[in-house]
Amino acid sequence: MKPDDIVIVGASESENIGIVPDVSAMGLAIDSALRALDDAGLTPADVDGIAGTMHPAELALQLGTRPRYADGTNVGGCSYMLHVRHAVAALRAGMASVVGIMHGESGRSRVGVPMMSMDMTAAPGQFERIYGVAGTFSMFTLPVMAYLNKYGLDESALAEVSVAQSKWAAQQPRALRQKIVTVDDVLNSSMIAWPFRVLECCPLTDGGGSLVLTTASRAADMDLKYAPVVVAGTGSLVEGAGSSFMEDLTSFRAFRESSAEAFRTAEMTVDDIDHLMIYDAYAHLPLYGLEDLGFVGKGEASEFIKSGATSPGGSLPMNTNGGGIMYTHTGMYGMFALQEAVRQMRGTSPAQVDGVETSFVQGVGGMFAAAGSVILRKP
Amino acid sequence: MSGKSVPSATPETLQYWEHTAQGEIWMPRCDDHGWVFPPRPHCPTCGKRPLDWKQLSGKGRIASFIISHRAGVGYQDEVPYFIIIVDTAEGPRMVGNLYGVPVTPESVTIGMPVEVFFEDREGVHVPQWRPVGSTVTL
Ligand SMILES: [Zn+2]
C-alpha cells in the first residue's frame, strides 16, 4: 500500500440536480464548490489550486480566489478523473496546497451555456458527423455491433446493464430515473439508435459537483466533517477523437491502459477492489469497462451483470448511484461517478454497501476519445 | 437541397475531397506503416512527410452499424437510417450510411460486402455505401 499522502477532504454535489432551471451552469459549479469546502471548514480564499472544464480564469473569479495552480484540461466527461490525477501531482510537488475541482453543467435547461458550435473541419466533423449523426447516441454507440457480433450476444446484453443499475437507482432519492425495470421494459422503451433504446441512453440533466483535495498533513489540521478519502492511484490515456478511429471496435485501449496505470500506482489488482464505478453514458460502456479493466474475461461482462454480481448484494457493486443512465448525466458525467465513490468510502451513500474499503472509478471522455481512472480507499 | 452537413476541407485534407469529386477514394500512405486515415500530411507512426497518396478499391465490409431513429442535420426525410462503419478492403476504417437495403437490423450482417458510391452535397462528393451489385444512387 502507498502512503496516504493525498486525500479528498471535500466532496459535494449541488443542492439540486436533475432539472434545475433557476441556476446557471457556473452557479451549479460554485454551489457545489462551497458545499465541498464546507466539508473541510474551508473558504474560497483557502483554495490555491483550481481545476475544471470551464474557463479557469472565469472559474477563479466566480469562486473568489487567485489560484497559483490552474488546470483546464478538457477531454470530455472523464476530465475530472484527469483533474484528480493532475492535482495529486501538483500537491506532491508543492504547486498548490488545496485544489478545488469543479463541475457545473446546465445540460437540460441550458442556463448560462455558451452556444455550441460543431467543428466541421476536425476529423470527426469531416469524416463522421456528416453522416446524419444527430447526437452522441448515434456515434458513441456505433462500435457496439462489432462487439455483440464478436461474442454472439444479442440486444438483451445491453438491457441487462440498465436492469442492474435500476436496482441501485431505486435506492437513490436524487436519481432522475428511480423505477426498477426489467429486460422487457428496456427493450420495449422507445428506439433511439438501434440497438439502443431510451432506457439504455443517459438522460440530459443539470447539476454541479466539486471535490477538494489536499495533502494528508494539511488535512490533519483541518476540521473535517468526514474522514478523508485517500487517492490511492490514478491513470489516464488519450486515444484520439472519434469512435470509428479507435484501434479496436470491441475493446477500448484507453480503458485498458488508463486502468492498468491506476492499478500500478495504487499497487493494487482487481482483487483489491470492493466497489466500482464505470462511466455509462450508454449501456455498452460498462460491458467494455468490466472487460478492459480486467474484472471479467472478454465477452463475459453481460453474463456477469445478468448473474447479479454488480447488483445490490452482489460481489462487485457497480454504478451504485444508478449510473449516468439512471442517476444524472449533465453532459460530462465523470464528476458524479467520483461523488458516489467518495460517498461509498465515507459511508454516506443512500445505497451504501457495507464493508467497502476501496473504489475504482473509470471515466471515458468524448466518444471513446479518452479515459481517466481513479482508485479511492479509506485511510 | 437536403440541407445535409457539408464537410469543411482543410488544406491537409483537400486532396481527399478532390479525389472523391472524381468518384475515387485516395488516402496518404507510408511505405513502412500503411494507410493514414483520417488524412494527415505525415505518418503518425514514424513522422515521415510528405506522403504519397494512393487509391483504394472502394470495396469493403460492414464492421458495425446502428439504425438512427433521430434525424441528424438534413436527414429528416430518411429516418430511420443506417450509420455504418466499413472496414475497407485495404484496411482503413470509414463511416458512412448504407443504402439499397430495407432499413431493418435483419438486412445487415457484420462482414457484409459493400461498395462505395458518392453523394453530391453542394459540390462536395461524400462517400456512401451500398451492397455489392446494388445500383442505388442519391
Ligand atoms: Zn511511417
Image (spheres, grey):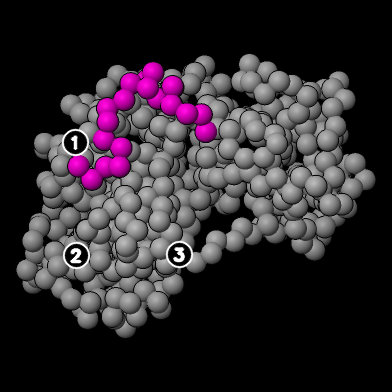
- The dot on residue B115 is none
Q: Which residues are magenta?
A: A173-192
Q: Position of residue A299 (x, y in %)?
A: 45, 23
Task: Choose mark 3 or mark 1, whichever is in front.
Answer: 3
Q: Amino acid at mark 3?
A: Val
Mark 1 crowd level (few <14, some 14–19, many ≥20, 10 Å Cα): many
Residue tagged by mark 2? A35
The subunit letter for the residue under badge 1 reads: A
Horizontal side of A33 relative to A357 (left or right) equals right
Q: Position of residue A206 (x, y in %)?
A: 35, 54
Horizontal side of A185 relative to B31 (left or right) equals left
Q: Is residue A92 visible?
A: no
Label located before the other in sequence (3 or 1)? 3
Magenta stretch encompasses residue A178: yes
Q: Amino acid at mark 2?
A: Arg
Task: Choose mark 3 or mark 2, whichever is in front.
Answer: 3
Whole-number angstrom distance, CA of label 3 to CA of label 2 = 22 Å
Residue situated in front as seen by the camera: A64 or A290: A64
Residue tagged by mark 1? A171
Residue situated in front as seen by the camera: A129 or A84: A129
Horizontal side of A67 relative to B88 (left or right) equals left
The residue shown at (69%, 27%) is: B62
Whole-number angstrom distance, CA of label 3 to CA of label 1 = 31 Å
The subunit letter for the residue under badge 2 reads: A
Mark 2 crowd level (few <14, some 14–19, many ≥20, 10 Å Cα): many
The residue shown at (27%, 31%) is: A179
Mark 1 residue CB less than 8 A from any atom of ligand 1? no
Mark 3 crowd level (few <14, some 14–19, many ≥20, 10 Å Cα): few
Give the SS element for disc 3: loop
The residue shown at (75%, 58%) is: B8
Residue tagged by mark 3? A113
